Structures are given as structure tokens and as C-alpha cells.
Amino acid sequence: MNQAVRARLRALVCGARTALRWRAARQDAGMVTSEYAMGIVAAVAFAVVLYKVVTSGTVSAELQGIVKRALDAGM
């Protein structure tokens, strides 16, 4: 009987610790302002690079050719 009580108490204590860890993890979930700022800076930098690539002469001419071929295709 004593061993059964100890096992049950151990399970309750371990379960309570796990629940506390989950609660703490949920409260800490999400990004802080500095992480949002870094994400925005990275997104803007990627957008600038993508804009420069797409508006370059070679890529722009190739995209215009693709669009022209698509519009000229017969059905």
C-alpha cells in the first residue's frame, strides 16, 4: 500500500511539473518587438533584392518574352 501511495504521489508531482512547464512555454510563445523588427528588416531586404533582380535588363527582357509568348499562344 505504501508503494502504491508513493507511486501515485510521484505521478501527481511529475504531472504538475509538466503542466507548469507547458504553462510557462505557452506564456513565452510568440515574438518580441525586436524579433518583429528583425523579421521586417529581413523581408524588406529580400524584397529589395528581388526588385533589383526582376527589374534588371536581362530578367526584364526574359519576362517580357514569356508574357508575349503566353499572350500570342493560340487555343
Image (spheres, grey):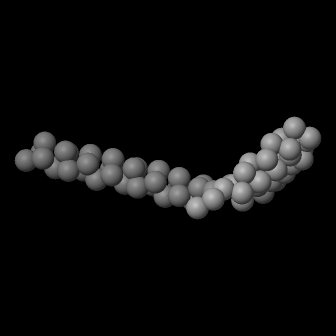
Give the percent coordinates (x, y) of residue 9.
24, 50
Q: Nearer the viewer, residue 42 or 66?
A: 66
**Quick one: which residue is furthest to the top in this view?**
58
Q: Percent position (x, y) of residue 59?
A: 83, 41
How many tags in the picture?
0
Q: Residue at x 89, y 47 (%)?
A: 55
41 or 61, nearer to the observer: 61
5 horizontally vs 10: left or right = left
Q: Residue at x 40, y 50 (%)?
A: 17
Spot occupied by residue 71 in the image (x, y as percentages of width and height): 72, 59
Q: Residue at x 86, y 44 (%)?
A: 61
Report the front residue among 6 and 51. Answer: 51
Q: Which residue of the protein is positioned furthest toward the left in this rendering?
A: 1
Residue pushed farthest right? 57
Residue 38 visible in the snapshot: no
* In the image: residue 71, left or right of residue 19: right
Which residue is more in the foreground, 55 or 42?
A: 55
Kindly identify the residue that appears in the image at 66 percent across and 56 percent down. Answer: 73
Picture coordinates of residue 48 (x, y %)? 88, 47
